[in-house]
Every structure is written in C-alpha cells, then in structure tokens.
Image (cartoon, rainbow, N blue to C red):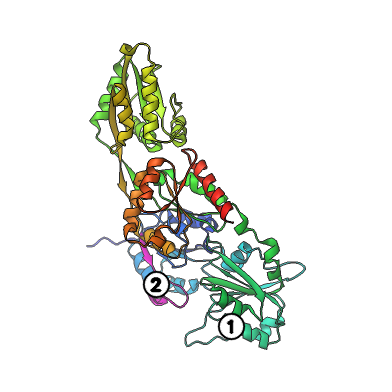
Amino acid sequence: MDKKIPQGKVWLAGAGPGDAGLLTLRAKEVLKYADVVVYDALLGADLLAWIPEKAEKIDVGKRAGAHTMPQEEINRILLTKAQEGKQVVRLKGGDPFVFGRGGEELKLLKEHGIAFEVIPGVTSAAAVPAYAGIPVTHRELSSSFHVITGHAKKGGERNLDYEALVKLKGTLVFLMGLSSLPEICDGLLSAGMDRETCAAVISKGTLAGQVSLTAAVGTLAEKTKKAGIETPAVFMVGAVCKLAEQYAWAEHRPLGNTAVLLTRPREQISSMAEKLRLLGAQAIEMPTIRIKRLEHNPELKKALAELSQSEKEHWIAFTSPSGVRVFFEQLKEWSWDLRKVFSRKVKIAVLGGGTERELEKHGYFADFLPEEFSALSLGKLLADAWKKQENRETFGTVYLMRAKEGSPDLTLPLEQAGLPYQDIPCYETVFAENRLLVERVKEMLRRRELTFAVFTSASTVRGFVEALDFKQESEEIKTGFYAVCIGKKTAEEAGKYHMKILMADRAEPDSMIAVMCRKRKEEN
C-alpha cells in the first residue's frame, strides 16, 4: 500500500512594492523554509536574491498587459504543489488582497482542504507615493484616500464612476493604470474635476530606477507620454501631490536612485548590503563565486602538526576573510587545540581590513598588515621582516593559509628573499550561478539600471563574466556601470572586459562604499 503523502501548506505573502527592505519580517521568515516559491514579474532583483537556492522557483510573470500564465493555472500550481507535501510561498507584489487576486487563489485551496496563511504586504498604494514625498492624506489637504484599479476587465471594460470619484474630494490612487491614464484623466475632467488639480505619476517606485512627475491633471497624460514614463507605475490625483517637491527624500540619500550588485561570496555579503541599504541603495546580492572547503586536507594537518610540535618561530599568513573562517572551522571540526597552534612564537599576517576583522572575531590580532591591498605587498612585507631577523636559525616557516589557486605574487618576494614557506590550500573558489537572478541582472544591464558592481577579487570578476556571458555583450552595456574594485589585481581583471573602474582607497568594504558615495555626489 502506498504511503500517504502529507499535505503541504501555502503562504500567500505580500512582497511589498519593490524595495527589499519593505518585505515584512514574517514573509522573509517563511521564505527561508520554502520548498516552492511562486513569484510575480514585478519583484525587485534584490528581493529575488532572498529566495533560497534549494527552493523550486516558478515565475508566473504577472505584469499588466503581459501575463505569461493564466490565473487559473497559477491557482492549480499552488494546489498541486501543496498536495505533493510541499511548503509553498506565493510571493505577490504589494499586498495580496489589494488588487492581487489573492482571494481567487485561496478559494481553490479552501475547497481542497489545503492549509494556508495570508501574510499582508506593504501596498504600493501608500508606499510608492511616500517614496516620492507624497502623503496620501494630510490634515489640511485631504482627509481620505481611495485606491482604484486602472486595469480594465476582460473585454476592455472599465466601469469607473468618475462623478462619484470627483465628489469624494479625497486623494485618488490608481494602480496598474498607466496605459489607461489618458482615459482616466479625461473621465475625471468630464465629471467636473478642475483641470489644475495637482496629479503625479511615479514609475518603479521604491526602486533605484524610481522616476516621479507632477503636473496638473489636465496635462498629466501629455507630460507622462513625453517623459517616457514606464510601467510599473502608480498615478494619483489630489492636492497632496503638490507636496512632492517639498517632501521628496528618496533620491536625496547618498546612494538614492542607485543599484549596486554585490558579487562576493554569500557569507561575506550581508554586512555590506545592510550599509548600502541604509544609504539608500538597492543592494542586489548575487554571489558569483562560492567558497568550497577542502575537507580532506593532509597538507593542512601536516602544517598544524609542525606548528604544534616545533620550538621555532613560525608565521601564519591569511589573505582573505574566507581563509580565516575556513581555517578555524576546520580546526574545530578536527578538535585541534588552538593553544598548540598559536603559541607565543607564532606571528600572524593578514591582507586587508576584512581579513583582520575576521581574525579578531576568533580572539587573535595581526602582527603584519600591509597598507596596500595586494598579495605582492604582503609578500614584500614578510620578506622585509625576514631580512631584519637577527637569528634566522630560530625561524621555521611561513604558512600561507589561502585559496588553492592563490596568486603567485605573494610567493615571489618570499622566494627572492630566501624565506622558507609552505603554501597550504584551505579552500577553493568555484563559480556560483543563480539563473533566476542572472536573467534579472542582465535585464537591468541592458536597461542601464545598474549603477555599480562590487568586486572583491579577480575571481568574483571572472564569476560575473561567466554567469552573465558578459563577453558577448555590447560595449555600451560593458561600460554602462562602474566596477568598484578592492585592489589592483581585481581592477586589472575588470579592465580586461572594458568595465569602467573605481578603486577603493583601502582594502575594506567601508572604503568601497565611500568611493560609490563620492561618485554619486559628483554626478548629481
């Protein structure tokens, strides 16, 4: 007899208007455990990055005028996946119950006894105007606001009672109505609305590409067409719209209207992404490489044994935060006593502020730190320190704890100085690819919506080029953003693909952020 498959569950979750920071804590929490994520086309790239790699991802592509999947088919997918015992998150733009057809999706689930939860989302009806500096209500200007769909029903019918809307004397917010804007404006004017009533249209609200336009309702359609405003867009009519210029704030942040792609390994991204978002950037986390620990590592075991048993002075060098993290993870897994490794005769060298901070997390502090972020600089620093050794007979070895494919620039100065060393591979970098995110980033590149791409190593550049098939892109796309690089080797690699280069002053994330802020200030 076949075992009965336990039924799964569906979470109908609002994703908010675009900015990943507006995703609710509850929605982010359930995403972590999703087996299946059914998502809309309007989700921002930064939010798509939060969908777990293990989850099955189903794009239902719901965008006004371009539905790739009928609503009935979406309903069926939710039911089928739940009946397979899957934990399903239906991620919908905005709020699922504000013109999101959430009620239709739940109806079929209820009929078949499928468990579900609804997670409300931040609706674009209020959030998008807020990002444009427009309060939907104001004590002196409007005591109510009304949300209306601008999307026509099947057959092109749009049954709006324009006279009733005009009599409301409140703020009118139209969702999914950009294509209907001329018709709606004409309808309001025909119903008696003053042609000079202030109105606004906001495209790609809350995202880096946000564009706002205010005008009198009598000229809004003409000016919107002339400005080339694109979907998705919200447009609104009411006296509060005149506050846009006075209260505009989103674009005035240091990195407002800025999209930043982060390509470093997943475990190193979060802190930098948070800082970028606080400065107003749309931070898109798309690791192009991942760190793979070398599990069976006889070379590392041999080096640890030598460090534990030798009476001589030894140096250990780390060239990346990943090297430090993997080293200590491996020692913990092997139950290796740190006191035997880090005796008073062991000195530690690190490359870059990030590596220094990662080391400090484990209670150790660097003895050597080159001012310039490069393997060559670290090699020269160690070689110079070696030359100053008074009694070289008491010195043992420099152990380089780094990637399997480490740069020869580090070892060259050591060899020239006659400094004994062992190159110990602790991990290797392999290309990581998130096809869902790659396609969205490609679209952003072609629409010139990406401002910066952050590269912390030559391997992240190569991973980016590999994932996006970047070599095949046009020169216009290759030079349509700035490659923010942490060192000369990284910049040289980015330069091979004709990217515009910005160099960080120091080898740390805060310095890279400062470079981006300066560049945006210059351009604005």
User: Residue at the location (48% across, 39% down)?
Assistant: 508
- Asked if residue 219 shows in the view, the reply is yes
Q: Which residue is mark 2?
A: 74
Rate crowding at label 2 as few (under 14), some (14 to 19) or many (20 or more) other CA atoms within 10 Å: some
x, y percent for residue 450? 46, 58
Give the label, 2 or 1, closer to the camera: 1
Q: Is residue 406 above or below residue 234?
A: above
Identify which residue, 300 or 422, lies in the foreground: 422
Residue 62 belongs to the span the image colors magenta = yes
Q: Is residue 433 left or right of residue 299?
A: right
**How many numbered circles does the render carry?**
2
Q: Which of pointers 2 and 1 lies earlier in the amino acid sequence?
A: 2
Q: Which residue is mark 1?
A: 182
Q: Per the image, is 229 magenta?
A: no
Q: Quadrant of residue 189?
A: bottom right
Three-letter code for the amino acid on which mark 2 is drawn: Ile
- Characterize the local packing of mark 1: few (<14), some (14-19) or many (20 or more) Cα atoms within 10 angstroms: some
Can you name the residue that lies furthest to the left here? 1
Q: Magenta stretch: give its range.
A: 56-74
Secondary structure found at label 2? helix
**In the picture, residue 190 is in which quadrant?**
bottom right
- The location of residue 299, given as percent across then percent down, is 25, 29
